[in-house]
Image: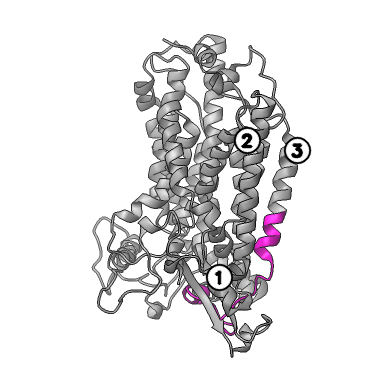
Amino acid sequence: MTTIAQQADADPDHVVDIGELPPISPPPAHDPTARLGPPMPTDRLRGWLVTLTVTLIGAVVRFWNLGWPTDKGTPVFDEKHYVPQAWQMLRNGGYEDNPGYELVVHPPLGKYLTAIGEWLFGYNAIGWRFVAAIAGTVCVLLIVRIARRLTRSTLLGALAGVLLICDGVSHVQSRLGMLDIYGVPFVLAAFGCLLIDRDMVRGRLAIAVREGWIAESEWGPRLGFRWWRLAAGVSLGLMCAVKWNGLYYILAFGLLSVLWDATARRAAGVERPWKGTLVRDVLPALWAIAGVAVLVYLGSWWAWFGSETGVDRHAVGNQIQASAWLPDALRSFLYYEGNVLHFHENLITGAPGVGTHPWESKPWTWPMGLRPMLYYIEQTPSPLAAGCGASQCVSAQMLIGTPALWWLAFPMIGWSLWRMATRADWRHAAVMVGYMAGLLPWFINIGRQMFFFYVTPLAPFLVLGLVLACGDILGRANAGRERRGTGLLVVAIYVGLVVANFAWLWPVLNGLPISAAHWQAELWLPSWR
């Protein structure tokens, strides 16, 4: 059986940094964690200074002129659904009691968060967008730390933060009172927690190898209580409490965690690693990730359960009969959830009363952002569009994925699959799991009406995949000076291109007044019109 130490000797990629400019000395040979992978960078202080600096820049960009645009002081696009629902929750103490909208079709957490901003600043654009901007800023902080842990490079961590700041999808969604942005920090937090859990599991197994009790059982040792995996379950439950698509991340991340356990046991020299994972790890993972997530999701409905007038709160005895084995409250809750599921299943393109939305798109167009969303537009002679310095002005806000990022989606996917197939690169595999969990489920019901803003949780994983590719371009820390210099030049040019592309799109991402000619120049593809 190949031991961890033998594997480390056979594959030096496991013990080198792939992105940091200064070479990092290898850890001492007696360090057991070195046998299971490279250590974290030692520049902890610099790492946090870089993280906070990039996050501050992200906050400035996200919060700049946050109150614009509005529809004559009212919400724009789908803000018109969720902003008043959040205000109603604030008025009622946490629940909705007016089904007249016929769109009470999402869990409450995202609307709770919007209500916090409305409570702080009132029923205005700043109020209903404030917490969304915080969520977008938190995503920047998280992706810096996640990329740093993935690559063991503070440089690449900072690069991930810069790219996410310059992503048009993340930027626009962070500046609107919609729900999608709220789920992203929870997905990123769950992913980051599982990364930490992976490192801790390998550290515990390394200790077992060092102390000589790794082979006491053919299944390997028990790994103890894993707080970070539990935290991942809590985060995924919160994601589901924003929107139901968090369910797919529970499935994907749960399988990923179990797979990491099996490969860690195998790397540690456990005699029967897969059976050991089945016996020791699967049930705890099922509880920590899926079970805890369900409990957190149910807990997010606390106000509804405690209400008397919440939507369908007393469906038992009115719309449906009582159950002999379910409490009335839970029976009513399942009826409510069933109605929500029916709504989503029957939101079909071209259905009677629905029709085709002018900005609808399908998931095969999403990786490259071929069909964006127009959220807001005002044209002269409206005074709201004045101030562009031309006789004809346009003020428009469009959800566009920065092409310098999104148009590289398929090359990024191809490169990650190649690295997975030829080098068994777990980093690329992990990012692909997160990316595909946000994309592939939408192909299940392809006739459903869909929109580009559903890709909001994909954006960070697109960025992480591109950052891993940049790390491969930079090369190893012990590569020659010429090799590293050339790689740094290529990456620097690319980052500059992304920043310039984001700057060019700035007016249409933020609804700023521009001339009609400039507006036409911003619409690069026919499908953007």
Secondary element at tag 1: helix
Residue occupying image coordinates x 25% and y 78%: 352
If the image is split into quadrants, where does the C terminus sit? bottom left
Crowding at mark 2 (Cα within 10 Å: few <14, some 14-19, many 20+):
some
Highlighted magenta segment, given as a residue range: 57-84
Q: Residue at x 47, y 61 (%)?
A: 302
Amino acid type at mark 2:
Gly
Q: Nearer the viewer, mark 1 or mark 3?
A: 1
Find residue 462 and report its horizontal and vertical position in percent.
50, 48
Looking at the image, is 154 positioned above or below residue 444? above
Q: Earlier in the sequence, mark 1 or mark 2?
A: 2
Q: Could you tell me the amino acid type at mark 1?
A: Ala
Measuring from the top left, give residue 107's x and y in whole percent. Answer: 43, 63
Image side of residue 49 versus residue 514, left or right: right
Q: Answer above or below: position of 482 versus 108.
A: above
- Residue 46, label in figure: 3
Measured in 3D between alpha carbons, the distance from the residue under mark 2 to the one under mark 3, in whole angstroms, is: 23 Å
Kindly identify which numbered label has been placed on residue 521.
Answer: 1
Q: Tell me which numbered mark, 1 or 3, is placed earlier along the sequence.
A: 3
Q: For marks 1 and 2, give the CA distance.
A: 33 Å
Q: Disc 3 residue type? A: Arg
Q: Is residue 77 magenta?
A: yes
The answer to whether residue 139 is visible is no
Whether residue 499 appears in magenta in the rendering, the answer is no
| Quadrant in the rendering for residue 177 | bottom right
Question: 174 and 480: which one is in front?
Answer: 480
Q: Toward the viewer: 390 or 74?
A: 390
Q: Pick whichever of labels 2 and 3 is earlier in the sequence.
A: 3
Q: CA distance from mark 1 to mark 3?
A: 41 Å
Q: Which residue is mark 2?
A: 487
Question: How many C-alpha atoms fall within 10 Å of the one at disc 1: few (<14), some, or many (≥20)?
Answer: few
> Is residue 134 shown above or below 431?
below
